[in-house]
Image: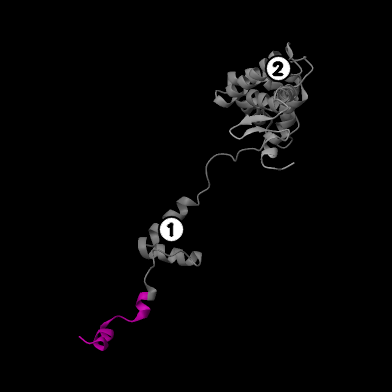
Amino acid sequence: MTDHKLADELPPLSSFEDAPKWDLVGPTVDDDIRRAIARYGANAVKEAASRLTRPKRGRKPEPDWPELREIIDADARDWLSGGDPFKARSNYSIAKDFADRSPGHSHPATMKRIERKLAKTRKVLTLLAAQLFGKDDYPYGAYLRTLEAITEVNVHPVWKESLARARSDIADYAARYGDTPPNTLSMAEVEAQVRKGLLAAIPKSGIGGIFGTLGSNGHLDRLGIK
């Protein structure tokens, strides 16, 4: 068969252009829908579209935490000052106050929602906030107390490691200076003092290594550099 006869028997190019192209997307939504209809049928596409675009059941979650943030921060600072915010203010009283300040909503439903959220996460959020505030702004004892409390409610190993590191820094401070840190020091200040002591312990002549002594001008002298 000659090339001319073969070309005459092939279907026209337009018939290939009209065929669905499963591996292509777009360029418009209509194109994608036409391809889906060609593959699955119009009824199947209608049913899938109806099912996938159906609104989800249940209420949309309420963004309560931004308004509760000041409660959590106040609880954290109360904890760091030695208080017990969870006894000082019950979840019920916080929820009632929140509902009182939310006109236009069902008061009982709002109270239940807030009480449920507080019961689930108030303590851990308060302690995590206290950990953030406590390292720089409060005595190191309050910071340690916070880390100890976090390890009781959150089993992630990072908190046990943080507690162990803080205790190690306090022990290093005592070993270097002959006594535990003053109660007025923050954990950040204890860490800084420990680092300062470590640097002071390095000989002024420098750090020895495979190249000899670095510092003063020992190594530089070897290279003829003054």
Packing grade of label 2 (10 A; few <14, some 14-19, many >=20) is many
Q: Position of residue 10 (x, y in %)?
A: 28, 81
Q: Position of residue 199 (x, y in %)?
A: 71, 26
Farthest left residue in view: 1
Q: Nearer the viewer, mark 2 or mark 1?
A: 2
138 in magenta: no
The residue wearing badge 1 is 46
Residue 165 location, quadrant: top right
**Sequence-earlier tag: 2 or 1:** 1
Which residues, given as a range, are shown in magenta?
A: 1-16
In the rendered image of this protein, does residue 165 appear above or below residue 64? above
The residue drawn where x is 46% and y is 64% is 25
Question: Is residue 153 visible in this depiction of the protein?
Answer: yes
In the rendered image of this protein, does residue 138 appear above or below residue 40? above
Residue 173 tag number: 2
Closer to us: 86 or 156 = 156
Closer to us: 33 or 13 = 13
Question: Is residue 145 visible in this depiction of the protein?
Answer: no
Report how many numbered discs are placed on residues in the image. 2
Q: Position of residue 1 (x, y in %)?
A: 20, 85
Q: Amino acid at mark 2?
A: Tyr
Q: Mark 2 touching mark 1, by CB under 8 A?
A: no
Label 2's element? helix
Farthest top residue in view: 179
In the rendered image of this protein, does residue 213 appear above or below residue 154? below
Q: Position of residue 207 (x, y in %)?
A: 66, 29
Q: Amino acid at mark 1?
A: Lys
Residue 197 location, quadrant: top right
Packing grade of label 1 (10 A; few <14, some 14-19, many >=20) is few
Closer to us: 193 or 97 = 193
Quadrant where the C terminus is found in the figure: top right
